[in-house]
Amino acid sequence: MAESLFRDRDQYNCSVCLDLMSDPVTIPCGHSYCRSCIKHYWDRDDYRRARCPQCRQDFPTTPALNKNTMLAEILEQLRNTTLQDSPPSPPAQCSAQPGEVECDFCTDGKLRAVRSCLECRASYCETHLQPHYDFPALRKHKLVVATEILTCPGHDKLLEAFCRTDNTLICMSCVMDEHKGHDTVSSAAERDEKQVTLQANKHKCVEKRKEKEKELHELRKATESHTISTQKAVEETELAFNSLVTSLEKSCSEVTESIRAQDVAYKDRSVELQEQLEIEIAMLMGQEDIMDKLIQTEDNVYFLQNFESMPSPSGDEESPARTLEPLVSLSGVSNMISEFKERLENFYKQELDNMFAKFHIKVGDRVRVKSSVNTPKYNWGCTVTHKSVGVVKSISEETVIVDFPEHKKWKGHLSEMERVTAADESAEQRRIKVGDRVRVKPSVTNPKLSWGRVTHQSVGVVKRLVGQDISVDFPEHSRWIGVVSEMELVP
């Protein structure tokens, strides 16, 4: 019998909590529930009167809840009977955490609600939500994601309307009461209208986000490219300097070998000369012996007879003195090497300064095209010259964008540009003297002391210089007064 009862145990589940009934009671329509479940359901009922959750029968007054003794005994036997083929327990559900919506029908421990019913004005966990799917009458209720259902504080009704006059949510009773005559619409209509605005704002936000993402992507790409370029530059620099060191070491070996070769040739020549001198010395010593013997003889006749045959040193006077001069002066070599070292140091210092001068250029600097550049990589444009001075607006890799007074957003190569310092401009200003032909610089938009009848094309002669003030006679404007820093020489 227990097995038969167990196979039919679903019929003993409370339709509210969907579990075996606890303290079962039967209401007048014949349906049975847990005492606590039906009491809680009636306390939350919207219609303020008792009705059956299953058949929806209404009762004029709240019925007395009498315990169903027979049903209670059957349920007790079911609880005490453990069978091998007992079905698995329903999946565990999560308890409601602070800030989450709780199930209104859980009694022991509040589980997290998954849906809220706008008709019942209650929230349900997965277990207590099941009747809304099983019973036709409950299927018509409107379920939403679990949320706290707000009601009108004055009428305790759902906020189904929106007052545009007061910009607030109201119930239908409010529409006919304190908000009568106001511009009111249903909350759904107001939501549809504002959702259009929200969608437009979202679209703008998405577009802006995509722009930022594109900018971020380009920045990362530029950074990656710069890192690769940096690594390549480091490798090429190391390779170039290693090659230069190798070349210098080779040159050092060649110069050293040449010096040693000169030393060997010098020593060979010295040995040859020493041998010749030793032979000549031996010959002279022999002649000295013969002359000593003749000098020591006491026989005058013998002396006179052999005097003419004695060797004469007159032939030696004609032979040049044997001197050995080095083919190359070693002190001269040392001086040449020192001079070469100094010139090389000056050369590579100057070249490196010029090479890395472009790294000193930054956004906002005043620059011009180097005088050594005949034709810029991206062309001159219509009005830019070597004398044009502009301001750097942006730098990307090797490309620089410059705003010249005569050409905005001019594009050039970074290595072709040089910074223009105050000292450079002062030096240029100091070159102007009385009698020079001058004109207003193209970079000057408005002269400090006004144009008068003068233009950029006007060429005049300097008549007077007093500090920074300059007086110029232009054909179209005599005794024009300007500032030296605004003028340039005309070839």
Image: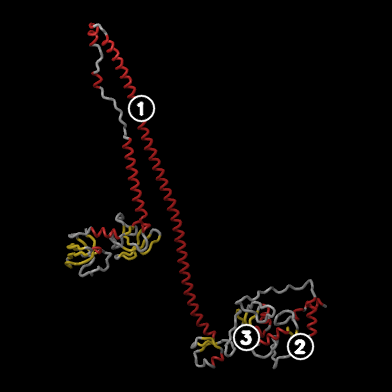
User: What residue sits right under mark 1 in the picture?
Assistant: 268
Q: Are marks 3 and 2 in contact (CB under 8 Å)?
A: no
Q: Which mark is residue 161?
A: none
| Location of residue 381 (image quadrant) | bottom left
Quarter of the figure that contains the N terminus: bottom right
383 relative position to 229: left or right: left
Residue density around tag 1, few if under 14, some if 14–19, many if 20 or more, within 10 Å: few
Q: Are marks 1 and 3 in contact (CB under 8 Å)?
A: no
Q: Which mark is residue 66?
A: 2
476 relative position to 3: left or right: left
Residue density around tag 2, few if under 14, some if 14–19, many if 20 or more, within 10 Å: few
Q: Which mark is residue 119?
A: 3
Amino acid found under the numbered disc labelled 1: Asp
Q: Position of residue 254 (x, y in %)?
A: 38, 38
**Residue sitting at x 62%, y 75%:** 97
Frontmost of labels 3 and 2 is: 2
Q: Secondary structure at mark 2?
A: strand
- 100, above or below 326, in the image: below
